[in-house]
Every structure is written in structure tokens, then in C-alpha cells.
Image (cartoon, grey):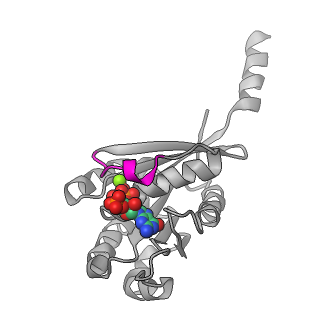
Amino acid sequence: MYTLLSGFYNYLTQKEEYNVLIIGLDNAGKTTLLERIKSIFMGVAGLSPDRIAPTVGLNIGRIEVNSSRIKFWDLGGQRDLQSIWQRYYSDCHAIVFVVDSTDGRRLEECKDTFETIITNDLVEGVPILMLANKQDLPNALRVEEIKEVFNKIAVKLGARDSRVLPVSALEGNGVREAIDWMIKRLQRNKLNRPPLYR
Ligand code: G3D
Ligand code: MG
């Protein structure tokens, strides 16, 4: 009887858990984004921007939305760290790819990096949200301009859900909408990539 009841209790209280990778070139704003997501969805005061050091290793953040837990993995973006990304691919349910919209000089490199990610079999079908970050700055490229560069490889996205959205991780503009979009896609892709239940 006890096991039956505790099993039922666990069933009622367990939540879906998803892993989301935050990746992109170094300095794109990944760690700033993670702090912003935590402050918007969990109401915790994030690290102030001047306390965010370049990420060595990884930062993890958790949020709870409705009945889901989402665990964000902010993996460092320096080139020697990029090879580590794929260790996380088979366990991830979505990818947030952050672009520094003010760094036109590295946009081609950014596109090549993106291409390497989306063509990896381990993330086939995984929803991808691309964020054109730093839109608060006057010299930021507009989403349309960034899309133009990435359109060259858009066919390689395959049948997965993907979207490009403008944000400012620093000021928070667009972040809630972007993450809301992603949460819907996580749930829609549930049969392909089932969440963990705990
Ligand atoms: P990373 O984790 O991708 O390497 P960080 O990037 O989050 O460390 O951010 C790199 C720099 O970009 C930081 O500036 C950070 O404040 C800035 N940044 C991140 N997002 C935004 C944004 O939306 N708008 C603006 N204006 N700046 C942003 P510093 O000066 O600390 O290096
Ligand atoms: Mg970082």
C-alpha cells in the first residue's frame, strides 16, 4: 500500500526536466543571458554585469515554468572550449545560439560555428533559437541583416523548429518572449526528445 501511495505521490509531484544549451562565440553574451533568464523567470537578482567574468568551464542555471524544470548550460565559447560542446549534445533538448550583433567582423566565423552545430547528428531535430543579442547598442546589426548571412546555410537546419529573435540580454528586452517560444518548442518536440521525469 505504501509503495502504491508513494508511487502515486511521486507521479503527482514529478516534473518534466529539460536541458538547454546556451552556446555561441566568446563575448556573445551567453553568461549575461543566463543571468537575465534567471532574474526574469525566478525573480532572483542576477550577477551584476561587471561581475560576469569570461566563462571558463560552465555555468548552470535552473528555472521552473508551469510544470517544467529547465536547466540551462552556459558552455564557454572560446575556440578550445567548443570541442566540449558536443559532449552535451545527446542530452540536450534545445539549443540557444547567441550572436553578438555588434561583431560584424566575426559574423562569418559565427555562421561556420553554427553550421558545425546544426549538422551534428547528435542534435538532429533539436529546436534551435538564435538570439541576435546586444540590440540595445546603436551599432548592432538588425535581425534581417544577420538572417541574410545565416540564410546561406538555412537548408541544413532540416525539419527542426528554429527561429531568430532580437534581444538585449543586458537590458532584458525580448528575452521573455524568446524563452517562451523555446519552451513551447521543447514541449512540441517531446516525442523526439523526451524530457527526464523527476
Ligand atoms: P559570453 O558569456 O558569451 O562570453 P558575456 O559573454 O555574457 O560575458 O558578455 C560579454 C560582454 O558583452 C560583457 O561586457 C557583457 O556585459 C556584454 N553584453 C552581453 N549582452 C549584452 C547586451 O545585450 N547589450 C550590451 N550592450 N552588452 C552586452 P564586458 O564589457 O563586461 O566585457
Ligand atoms: Mg560566459
Task: Determine the image quadrant of residue 82.
Answer: bottom left
Q: From which residue to which does the magenta span run?
A: 47-56
Give the residue furthest to the top: 2
Q: Percent from the top left, x then y, of residue 2?
A: 76, 10
Is residue 122 in view?
A: no
Q: Is residue 112 left or right of residue 180?
A: left
**If the image is split into quadrants, where does the N terminus sit?**
top right
Residue 179 in picture, x, y percent from top left: 60, 60
Residue 168 percent location from the top left of the image: 51, 68
Q: Is residue 64 visible?
A: yes
The residue most toward the left is 80
- Assign ligand 1 to one image quadrant: bottom left
**Identity of the residue drawn at 43% across and 81% down:** 154
Q: Is residue 93 above or below residue 177?
A: above
Judge by depth and name the residue closer to the eye, 122 or 68: 68
- Could you tell me which residue is drawn at 56 percent across and 56 percent down? 192
Query: Of residues 33 and 123, which is closer to you in this image?
Result: 33
Q: Is residue 66 toward the left or the right of residue 98 in the image?
A: right
Identify which residue, 10 or 53, lies in the foreground: 53
The mark tally for this picture is 0
Magenta residues, dominant SS class: loop
Q: Residue 152, position in %: x, y?
A: 37, 87
Residues 13 and 34: in front is 34
Residue at 42% across / 80% down in the picture? 140
